[in-house]
């Protein structure tokens, strides 16, 4: 029997089925990779194992005991620990003190640190190579050092099952290698590990077995190479073989005058370079897609175009430079962003949400606009008086796009339109994107991790990696030419 | 070596020396009036330190400090005015009642997330105030309740009682926050999810912190009743007083325990000495000073010392 066995675990958030009857298991001494694009439900599945989310159904057998729905501290007592993607150490305590906390028993009368507890903490720091930094403040550690500190906090508890959430996010290539070696060594001592990652290449060599997820469901399981070669996995990451999906729209390779033109754009956040020398053209009255994994720089690009973050380089819209134009004027000029997080007003009705988008319009204009939106999304018309938060995931996405449309965009930027949506719901979004194209009113620029979806609609695709454009071209050539870069 | 790097025993030794020096104040020709202000300031310091334990460490904003203080004060006052017990027994009962009331309030409230805990504590003060007015035949209602007994008459002894309460509270809270218990509390305050994953039952620790805070707040509230000779809602059960406690703790320096002592004495002294300006103007001045400290010294008055030290070192 496996050390951990999750059977049919399910979790829904409002209308979104984040994890749908998922089964997986991990043995002692094994590293299991849980892979899938952003929003596929990996982290939610992990959180259910840790007890941070209570499953709506299914069982989680830990060494034979069903722990589904237990509080995290009881599950932690059973030997489970989790390393979070974002490290939040106590800033006023030293590195050693941060690890010491993890060694303390869950007891109120806890007035002295015993030498054994201190030794355990130092040993954990030694394992991750932070022994010599124990008296520093966390703020003095580099980014990778903080990640090591988080790992030390978990190791200090000597867990039998260690959950690692995106352990490589934000690390450089050499740091990824060092960290991989570190993780590989943890498997000894009969420890079971589960590693969650959206970047399949980095985990391929590390994991013994992989479970691939999409839209909350398991789509493949087995040896990592077999999983990466799996047809379903390739479709989720890359899109199908060109021919079967292409063709809903006439592909225009030669674009004519682009509505938006970005050249040599650079964005920096402190020391980190989010965009480097990005140039792209957005097809007028067509659909342009920027694809890439989480963290590739897609959202930074959108934020730079809409003026939410400062950037170096040139952006021109309908022939006019946007240099120095504040964000609200860019929006009024007709570039409207529908953000990844949707930002709906949950306690307002569908109609109220739409009217918030059309606030600046005259009454007659607004009415006409509303008719247009409800024509594109008939569902929103049916649900006018329903609270936004009670809508399903797909309907919320329609509402978010609809509200953006109320602002009369000439260019609509949609960040991750299919994030967290089930395949059947994606079809609905697909139809509405084609309906928008047919309306001939506006141009679309979408950011997507789902390459199938992107190649189904886009006249032109840009592949982003580490903040730079790595490939661009027509959708028909995408899978053949760019596929190897992703899987 | 700076104060923040000193071992705990050395810090407690400094506290003991400062307390001993402060105990001499009544004998160096200080005016009665000044002494009475310091006495009130020290009681206020106990409230502010205990607020700091909850906010600075456990990360919970308690807007109902006067719920705990008022429970202690009114328990002691009502027992004394009915001739049930001697003052010392009344004070002990006040502290005990505050812990019980605090636990009954906090146990359900701490299960709420986000700002709701703070709101529940605020509502608790409002309800308690209305109950006191509703049962005015027993509680004295809006007029207040006179306490026939006193612990001491002369101002020096009363000053020493307040000083002792503040010093003992400071020492115990300081030991607590420097202990593993304090470390866990701080971890919970900063990142409750991570703390749970490290195996800690966060409600248990927060409840313990709330009960400790309730004990000292109730104790000081009961002592202050015997000092003032009367318990009234405007002093002991008032949201505005709760806000002043918060301001005192933040001016002094949150997450320092000792800082709120400075903040509390400053607040009480400022309110007294600015009184000639007239009610609204003096309150406004104190509020402005608080605002300036919040903007420019987020670490509070004690944080100022740290900044100056760093500047010298640089």
Image (cartoon, coloured by chain):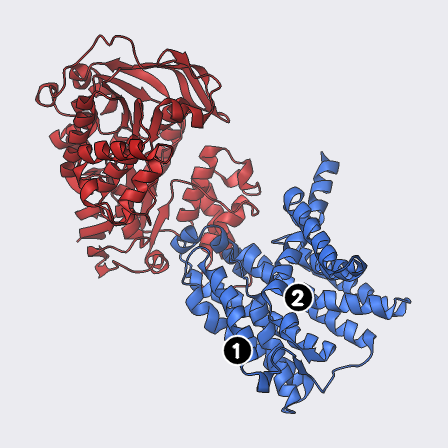
- Indicate left or right for A73 with A401 as reference: right
Residue that carries the numbered disc 2 in the rendered image: B46
In this rendering, which labeled residue sits more in front, label 1 or label 2?
1
Q: What residue is at 26 percent from the left and 21 percent from the top?
A: A442
Q: Is residue A217 above or below residue B227?
A: above
- The residue nearer to you, when weighing A473 against B33, is B33
Callout 2: few (<14), some (14-19), or many (20+) C-alpha neighbours within 10 Å?
many
Quadrant including the C terminus of chain B: top right
Mark 2, chain letter?
Answer: B
Quadrant including the N terminus of chain B: top right
| Residue A2 appears anywhere in the view | no
| Residue B161 appears anywhere in the view | yes
Which chain is in blue here? Answer: B
Callout 1: few (<14), some (14-19), or many (20+) C-alpha neighbours within 10 Å?
few
User: Could you say which quadrant of the image residue A365 lies in?
Assistant: top left
Q: Is residue B279 above or below residue A161?
A: below
Residue that carries the numbered disc 1 in the rendered image: B131
Q: Residue B225 appears at what percent x and percent y? A: 68, 77
Q: What residue is at 68 percent from the left and 55 percent from the top?
A: B259
User: Quick check: marks 1 and 2 in contact, CB under 8 Å?
Assistant: no
Mark 1, chain letter?
Answer: B
Secondary structure, mark 2, is helix
What tint does the image give chain A? red
Q: Which mark is residue A56?
A: none
User: Could you say which quadrant of the image residue B240 lies in?
Assistant: bottom right
Q: Residue A116 appears at what percent x and percent y? A: 49, 56
């Amino acid at each position: 029997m496996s050390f951990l066995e999750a059977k049919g675990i399910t979790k829904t958030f409002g209308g979104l089925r984040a994890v749908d009857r998922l089964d997986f298991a991990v043995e002692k001494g094994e590293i299991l990779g849980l892979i899938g694009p952003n929003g596929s439900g990996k982290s939610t599945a992990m959180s259910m194992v840790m007890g941070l989310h209570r499953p709506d159904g299914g069982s989680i057998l830990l060494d034979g005991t069903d722990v589904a729905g237990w509080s995290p501290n009881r599950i932690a007592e059973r030997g489970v620990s989790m390393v979070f993607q974002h490290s939040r150490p106590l800033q006023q305590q030293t590195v050693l003190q941060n690890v010491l906390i993890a060694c303390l028993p869950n007891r109120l009368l806890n007035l002295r640190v015993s030498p054994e507890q201190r030794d355990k903490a130092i040993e954990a720091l030694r394992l991750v190579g932070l022994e010599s930094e124990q008296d520093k403040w966390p703020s003095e550690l580099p980014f990778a050092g903080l990640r090591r500190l988080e790992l030390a906090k978990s190791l200090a508890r000597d867990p039998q099952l260690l959950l690692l959430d995106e352990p490589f996010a934000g690390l450089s290539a050499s740091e990824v290698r060092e960290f991989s070696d570190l993780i590989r060594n943890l498997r000894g001592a009969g420890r079971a590990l589960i590693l969650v990652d959206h970047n399949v290449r980095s985990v391929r060599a590390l994991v013994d077995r992989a479970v691939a997820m999409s839209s909350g469901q398991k789509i493949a399981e087995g040896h990592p190479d077999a999983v990466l070669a799996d047809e379903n996995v390739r479709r989720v990451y890359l899109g199908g073989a060109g021919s079967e999906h292409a063709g809903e729209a006439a592909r225009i390779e030669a674009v004519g005058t682009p509505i938006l033109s970005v050249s040599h754009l650079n964005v920096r956040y402190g020391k980190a370079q989010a965009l480097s020398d990005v140039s792209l053209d957005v097809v007028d009255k067509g659909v342009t897609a920027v694809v890439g994994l989480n963290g590739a720089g897609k959202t930074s690009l959108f934020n730079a175009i809409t003026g939410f973050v400062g950037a170096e380089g040139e952006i021109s819209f309908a022939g006019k430079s946007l240099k120095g134009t504040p964000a609200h004027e860019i929006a009024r000029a007709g570039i409207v962003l529908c953000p990844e997080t949707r930002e709906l007003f949950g306690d307002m009705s569908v109609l109220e949400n739409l009217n918030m988008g059309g606030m600046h319009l005259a009454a007659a204009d607004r009415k006409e606009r509303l008719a247009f939106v409800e024509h594109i999304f008939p569902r929103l018309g049916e649900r006018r008086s329903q609270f936004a938060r009670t809508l399903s995931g797909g309907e919320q996405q329609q509402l978010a796009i609809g509200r953006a449309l109320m602002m009369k965009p000439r260019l609509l930027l949609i960040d991750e339109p299919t994030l967290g949506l089930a395949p059947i719901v994606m079809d609905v979004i697909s139809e509405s994107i084609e309906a928008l194209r047919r309306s001939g009113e506006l141009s679309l620029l979408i950011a997507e991790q789902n390459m199938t979806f992107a190649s189904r609609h886009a006249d032109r695709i840009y592949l982003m990696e580490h903040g730079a454009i790595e490939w661009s071209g027509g959708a028909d050539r995408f899978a053949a030419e760019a596929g190897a870069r992703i899987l | 070596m700076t104060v923040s790097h000193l071992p705990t025993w050395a810090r407690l030794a400094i506290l003991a020396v400062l307390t001993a020096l402060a105990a001499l104040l009544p004998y160096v020709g200080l005016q009665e009036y000044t002494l009475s202000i310091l006495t009130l300031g020290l009681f206020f310091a106990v409230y502010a330190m205990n607020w700091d334990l909850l906010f600075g460490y456990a990360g919970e904003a308690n807007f109902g400090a006067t719920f705990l203080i008022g429970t202690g004060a009114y328990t002691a006052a009502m027992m004394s005015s009915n001739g049930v017990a001697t003052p010392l027994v009344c004070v002990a009962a006040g502290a005990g009642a505050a812990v019980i009331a605090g636990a009954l309030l906090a146990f359900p409230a701490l299960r709420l997330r986000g700002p709701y805990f703070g709101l529940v504590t605020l509502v608790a003060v409002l309800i308690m105030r209305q109950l006191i007015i509703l049962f005015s035949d027993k509680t004295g209602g809006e007029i207040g309740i006179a306490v026939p007994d006193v612990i001491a008459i002369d101002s020096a002894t009363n000053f020493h009682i307040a000083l002792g309460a503040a010093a003992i509270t400071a020492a115990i809270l300081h030991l607590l926050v420097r202990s593993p218990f304090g470390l866990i509390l701080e971890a919970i305050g900063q990142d409750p999810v991570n703390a749970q994953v490290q195996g800690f039952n966060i409600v248990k620790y927060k409840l313990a912190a709330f009960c400790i805070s309730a004990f000292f707040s109730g104790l000081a509230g009961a002592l202050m009743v015997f000092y003032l000779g009367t318990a009234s809602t405007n002093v002991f059960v008032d949201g505005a007083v709760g806000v002043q406690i918060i301001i005192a703790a933040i001016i002094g320096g949150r997450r320092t325990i000792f800082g709120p002592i400075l903040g509390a004495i400053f607040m009480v002294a400022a309110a007294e000495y600015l009184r000639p300006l007239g009610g609204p103007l003096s309150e406004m001045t104190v509020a402005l000073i608080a605002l300036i400290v919040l903007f420019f010294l987020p670490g509070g008055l004690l944080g100022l010392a740290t900044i100056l030290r760093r500047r010298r070192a640089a």
